[in-house]
Image (spheres, coloured by chain):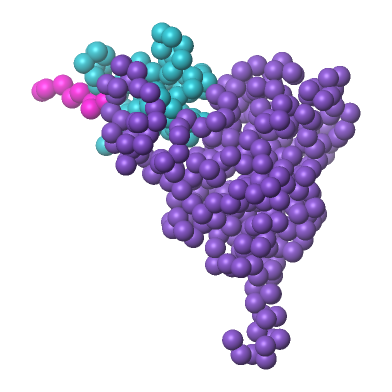
Chain colours: A cyan, B purple
Amino acid sequence: MPEVVPQSETKNSPPPAVPRKGPRGEVTIYPTWCKGCHICVEFCPQQVLAMDASNEHATVVHPEKCTACHFCDTHCPDLAIVVRKLE
Amino acid sequence: MSEHILEAATLKKEEALLPQANWFERSETLQKLRKTKKFPTIWCAGCGIGVVMGALIRAIDHLGLDNDQVALVSGIGCTARMPVYMDFNTLHTTHGRALAFATGLKIARPDMKVIAIMGDGDALAIGGNHFIHAARRNLGITALVVNNSIYGMTGGQYSPTTPFGRKATTAPYGNIEPPFPVCELAIAAGASYVARSTVYHALELDKYLTEAIAKDGFSLIEAVSYCHTTFGRLNKLGTAADMMRALKENTIARTAFERLPPEEQAANTKIVRGNFVNIERPQYTAIYANLISEVRGGEK
C-alpha cells in the first residue's frame, strides 16, 4: 500500500513516519509585510514558525506540523499570514 | 491587482521566490484591504490595532455587507489610521470628533452601517461629550474603542484609561488618576449593546463586532489592546508577545466572574470581558423619520 503524503509536505522536510490525525493546514507568510514582532513564533502551539537567520521575518520551518488552528493568521497585526485548511 | 504592492515594496531576492502574485486572492480578509495603499501598516511591529482591523474585516465579511453599505469614521491617533487601509467608505475627521461626524452621516444616510473607530483618548478625553450623547440618543452607530491605555502617536502621555499608578511620559512617578471604566460609562449613558474583549481573544472580538454591527442602536465594543512601545517600555512590561500573553492571563470571562463569591468579585483586578448589555431601545433615526412624516401631515 503506497504511503499517503499530505500536500503540505515539501521536499526539504521528511514526511512523518505515521500519518498524523486531525486537520492539516498550509501556512504562507508574506515577508514584505512581516515586521518581525515574534507574536506568531511565540504563540504557535506546534512550533511551525521560527524567526529567520536575520531575525527580521518569521518563516515556516515545520509545515507538516500545522494543525490549521488559525492562531497566527487571526493574531498577525500586519495580516502577513494566510492559513489554508487542507482537505 | 497586486501590481501596486509589488511595485511599492522593494523585494529581496529570496522573497521574490515566494508566491506573491496571488497574495490578495488567498484570503477573504486581504480582499477587503485598500490595494493602492502602501503596506505594511504604519503601526509599530506587534501592535494590537492590526489584530482589531482583521477582526473588524472578518465581522463585516461575516455579515455579508457590501463595501458601499459600510462607512468607517475615525478621528486622530494610532487607531484612527485603521480605516485608511480598508476598502470601505471612510471619513478621517478631526481629533475626538469621529462620533460627531458619524452622527451627521447616520442621520443623512440611515440605511448605512456607520462604524466609528476611536482610540481611548480620542473617544473619552477629546470626544468624551460626543461619546455619552451618542449613547444617550441611541443612534445606530457602532463605536469601536481600541483601548491601549495611553496616547501612543503623540509620545505616550497618560490618557483617561491609564491604570492608577502606571507610568507615562507625562506621569513619570505614576498616574494619580483613576481610569475611566469605558463599558460602564456607555451602559450608564444608555447604549443598547456593550461588550468588551481583548486582542488576544480575536475570535471573540469577531463575534461581538458582528453582533454590534447588526444591532439597530448605539453599540460599543471596547477592544483592550496594548502599547508596548511607550506604555510597555515605561512600565517594564516586555515585548508585544509578552503583553499579549498578559492579556490572556489577566482577563476573566463575565460568566466566570459572576460565579465568583462576592468578596472575590470585589477584590478582582482582572479585566472582565464579555457582553454586558443587549437591549432593545427606540433608535434615533427611526424616531426622527417618524417625526418628519408627522410634521408633514403624513405625506412623504
For residue B162, above or below residue B139: above
**The furthest residue to the front:** B7
Q: For the point 64% across and 90% down, which residue is it?
A: B298
**Residue A54 shows in this picture:** yes
Instruction: Count the labels in the image.
Output: 0
Residue stretch rendered in magenta on the structure: A1-8
Quarter of the image with the C terminus of chain B in it = bottom right
Q: Is residue B15 left or right of residue A44?
A: left
Q: Is residue B201 left or right of residue B193?
A: left
Camera-side residue of B15 and A28: B15
Q: Position of residue B93 (x, y in %)?
A: 65, 49
Q: Position of residue B275 (x, y in %)?
A: 66, 48
Quarter of the image with the N terminus of chain B in it = top left
Q: For the point 10% across and 23% down, which residue is it?
A: A1
Q: Is residue B198 left or right of residue A32?
A: right
**The furthest residue to the top:** A53
Query: Quick check: is A3 in the magenta stretch?
Result: yes
For residue B267, above or below residue B120: above
Secondary structure mainly formed by the magenta segment = loop
Q: Position of residue B273 (x, y in %)?
A: 67, 40
Q: Position of residue B7 (x, y in %)?
A: 35, 31
Query: Quick check: is B70 in the magenta stretch?
Result: no
